[in-house]
Image: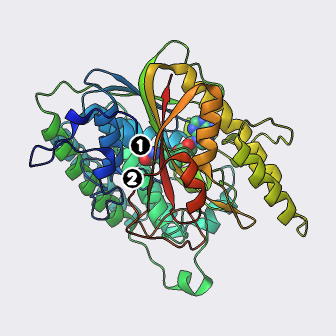
Amino acid sequence: MPQYKLDKFLKKDGRAMQLTDIDWDMKDANTREYTHGIHVYPARMLPQIARILIDHFSEKGDLVLDPFCGSGTVLLEASLAQRKSVGIDINPLATLIAQVKTTPIDPQKLWSDLSLITDLIETRIASVRDGQKPPTYEFDNQKQIDHWFKKEVQRDLSIIKSALESLAQSDSLDFFKVVFSDTVRKVSNTRNNEYKLYRLSKEALEGYQPDTFGTFQSFAKKGIDGMTRLYERVKGLEYPVPHVRNENLLSTNLENEKFDLMVTSPPYGDSHTTVGYGQFSKFPLIWLGGQYSLNIPTCGKMLGGRKRDDALIPSDTFHEQLDMIRKNDEEHKNKRWREVVSFFADYQDCVKRVFDSLKEGKYACFVVGNRTVREVRIRMDLITTEIGEYYGFSHHITIPRTIPTKRHPFTQKLYVDPKWTDVFERKTAKTIENIVKEHIVILRKQ
Ligand SMILES: C[S@@+](CC[C@H](N)C(=O)[O-])C[C@H]1O[C@@H](n2cnc3c(N)ncnc32)[C@H](O)[C@@H]1O
């Protein structure tokens, strides 16, 4: 068994607690502590997982990397634990949320700006009632906007957007952009419990009258409450604000920094099928406008977007599984194996980049899900380990856990043993396939 830093986790009776003693399912974990719940985001990491990994594998003042930072869960936990951090994500909505989530702002300032915006909104509503034209915004594809937003909703969102312009000089502007973005998503004609864009049925749309101003107000208050808790928590604390970069990991430059720890949940490689980060972010980004709307991440830009069918991927498990997918592909016109190769070709580049950017002896923690393609459960945990070993990592430990959320990104039903919290070595892992939904794969740079 590998050595742990046992002094980090002491049980009440003073006995050392190992990673293996933790109930990783964390069914009752509060996922919205501080600003964690400021905006919905697909496949968010549990803050508690990030917290434990950061605490266990790094020290105060260390530099942590999350190369797929999404909405910034790891970054916020790093700052709270007084670690510096760098977060990278290709999705400008993700980096906007991550930036706002991790930047404490005085709640007094937010309340006073909210009251300013509210006054402006009320004035505009009154003037529209008096027959004046509401503010309007031009969209490249108005037909698409009409399809996804009711006319009254478009009018109300335009009023809020124009009110936000009054904050142009305020450091709270990004905070309210995040609130606006979450509002856009909530009041659109999409089914709100999906990350992909599915329009409400005709019947459902008939009686659908979303309260746009009310939603904006309630999201703003919820966000300010979270920010108040963060602000109080970090008072008097040395709090390093993370460095968030809106970049493609495959082309970003990581050569200037050396990291003490990497914690991330990479994409599952299924943007086309289940977790559509681009689809999820599309309308918020269109409504935010300007640079945001020019940068909507399409599947083509995400990991696996470059079509490749000749990649040499250093993982036996990958090739075994690819053969099975190719075989099952035979009876289908659409060949899914190509998409799998394209994804892992990019993924291996990412693993190598992470390896190169870490200091010697330091750890990389990948929280990965095993998705299914053509009935083959892709063992992302084993493939990550094998690719990692090829580039020079050694396997430290793999921890399986179940995902307790109802809104998880998998469409297929899996058999899950909820009591399964044990830790297994890589070899035995092969024999318990199909039991768990997520793994925390921990590798160490030799
Ligand atoms: C599972 S999510 C991360 C969620 C994050 N841990 C959180 O708690 O919000 C994976 C992220 O990878 C990003 N991504 C996909 N391809 C990328 C690429 N080539 N470079 C950088 N980020 C990418 C997606 O935009 C998405 O936000």
Which residue is at a point 44% across and 21% down the rendered structure image? 361
Q: Which residue is mark 1?
A: 97
Instruction: Give the residue type that dot 2 points to.
Output: His
Residue at the top extreme of this rendering = 256
Crowd class of label 2 (few under 14; some 14 to 19; many from 20; radius 10 Å): many
Rendering coords of residue 5 (x, y %) = 28, 32
Q: Which residue is mark 2?
A: 39
Tag 2's secondary structure? loop
Q: Is residue 363 above or below residue 276?
A: above
Which residue is at a point 73% across and 44% down the rendered structure image? 316
Rendering coords of residue 27 (x, y %) = 32, 64
Horizontal side, residue 172 vs residue 16: left or right: right
In the image, 100 versus 258, the foreground residue is: 258
Q: Are marks 2 and 1 in contact (CB under 8 Å)?
A: yes
Instruction: Of the two numbered discs 2 and 1 on the same chain, state the one appearing first in sequence.
Output: 2
In the image, 43 versus 371, the foreground residue is: 371
